[in-house]
Amino acid sequence: MLDEIIALAKRRGFIYPGSEIYGGLGGMWDYGPLGSQLKKNLKDWWWEDMVIKHDDIVGIDAAIMMNPKAWEASGHVEAFTDPLVECKTCHRRFREDKKGEIQAHEQEHKKKNESIEWTASQKFNLLVKSYLGVIEGKQSEIFLRGEITNGVHVNFKNVINSTRIKIPFGIAQIGKAFRNEITPGNFTFRSREFEQMEVQFYIPPQEEEAMRWFEYWKKDRMDWYIKLGLNPEKLRFRDHSDAERAHYARMATDIEYEAPWGWDEFMGIHHRGNWDLSRHMQYSGQDLRYKNLETGEEYIPFDIETSAGVDRSLLFLLCDAYKKEERRIVLKLHPRLAPYKVAVFPLVANKAELVGKAQEIYHSLQKNAWPVAWDDRGNIGKRYFAQDEIGTPFCITVDYQSLEDQTVTVRDRDTMKQERVAIPQLIEYLNQ
Ligand code: ATP
């Protein structure tokens, strides 16, 4: 099924292989006209629910390139450059010298009757290096961020000082991250350039509080993906074992989806303790403690992080929406996510009055900011199927009756039922 989705994504302009005319570049993908709109709809929805609708969460947009010290502080330079072996089954990496962890990991796979094979030991540097500066020989080496999290932590004080926000509060961010993944694959699932959407939620440094917020965000995020239309039966939590938890995490749970290749992670909820802020305090020499102005108490807060992949979320939304019916392929995307909300057709292309009226409707929808498609090729049935395949929820057809009584047919993607709607009522009908 994944092959079919990859083919559809390319054919209809959702996702193309990156720099394809040059033979591609491993782990890179380009989003086409429909894919970029779908991605934008997903991110806008996330931002609306996380930032706009929350009093206690603000957004930022930090630079991709950071002072290299930030990556030493975050632990990535160290964690990402030791000689490591990677498990070919689940892509987790372990330091070669941590034999106990490796054995424990092998046991976990064995318990589930899964095969286990390791890559050769190598110094993996997961951080992508670049050079900043124009004078050859005087350039400084920097990293493209390997996760977007640290752009938030280094701005913790700036956000506190420039807003009136008080703990508990969150900082949200959406942005690109880069990783030298050694085994990119499963379409966009493991890419070398990808996007994340995250909230770092700062709370008082108490384990009880941490538990409460950890559970809160787990539920909140699961509910959100169900609201987006993902089949709840294909969603589950998976707690990280001690051996697999990242260097910064005290508690970690993934939300997994049952992908065509098996259950796999597309977002994580992590209790990061005060790891990040205390490390940035240590490496920057700046005081990053939070001061409770009412009690005078000062502390380094804990951080409960929710970190989701935009590309993985989008991929799973596509997999979940993809339905093969007897006569058609249909993407049952939530209408809010669908790239086009509506398509407009004249019944036939060679009748000027029909085309004129259909154009009028098309332009009036467009002026009202409705993402609308136009099609006048082939027969109506084929046009319906072409829209089903890209998830357009409604198709409007202008026929001969439209010229007489100012009504059109509106066809529903999921039920394939048609209703006659008066043209002046169209926008209200679609809104509903
Ligand atoms: P994995 O174990 O699959 O490598 P991870 O545990 O390293 O992922 P995190 O560091 O927790 O991932 O990143 C948070 C989210 O960012 C992931 O849940 C995923 O959605 C996304 N992500 C991470 N790496 C990639 C990648 N190479 N390609 C696409 N998305 C990614």
Image (cartoon, grey):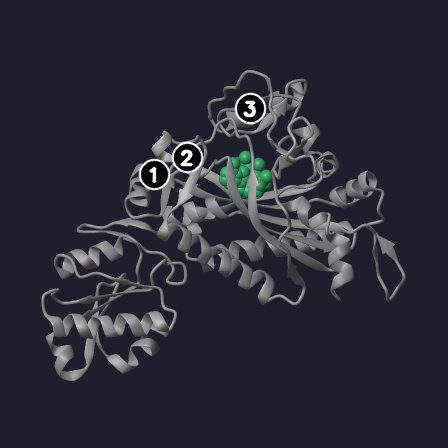
Going from the N terminus, do you reach mark 1 or mark 3 first?
1
Q: Secondary structure at mark 1?
A: helix
Classify mark 3 as within 8 Å of ligand 1 or not, answering yes or no: no
Residue 323 appearing in the image: yes
Q: Residue furthest right?
A: 296
In the rendered structure, which amino acid carries the disc numbered 1? Leu
Q: Which residue is mark 1?
A: 2
Q: Which residue is mark 3?
A: 86
Q: Are the two marked residues, 2 and 1, in contact with CB atoms closer than 8 angstroms?
A: yes
The quadrant where residue 77 appears: top right
Task: Name the spot of residue 214 as percent of width and height, x first.
Answer: 65, 51
Image quarter of the N terminus: top left
Going from the N terminus, do you reach mark 3 or mark 2 first?
3
In the rendered structure, which amino acid carries the disc numbered 2? Asn
Image quarter of the C terminus: bottom left
Q: Residue furthest top?
A: 120
Residue 230 appearing in the image: no
Task: Name the spot of residue 9 as percent of width and height, x first.
Answer: 33, 45
Per the rendering, the mark at residue 94 is none
In the image, ligand 1 is in what quadrant? Answer: top right
In the rendered structure, which amino acid carries the disc numbered 3? Glu
Front residue of this view, candidates 13 and 318? 13
Question: For the residue carrying disc 2, how many other residues have a C-alpha within 10 Å: few (<14), some (14-19), or many (20+)?
Answer: some
C-alpha span from label 1 to label 3 = 24 Å
Q: Which residue is mark 2?
A: 186
Task: Name the spot of residue 179 as percent of width and height, x first.
Answer: 56, 34
C-alpha span from label 2 to label 1 = 8 Å
C-alpha span from label 3 to label 2 = 17 Å
Q: Secondary structure at mark 3?
A: strand
The quadrant where residue 386 appears: bottom left
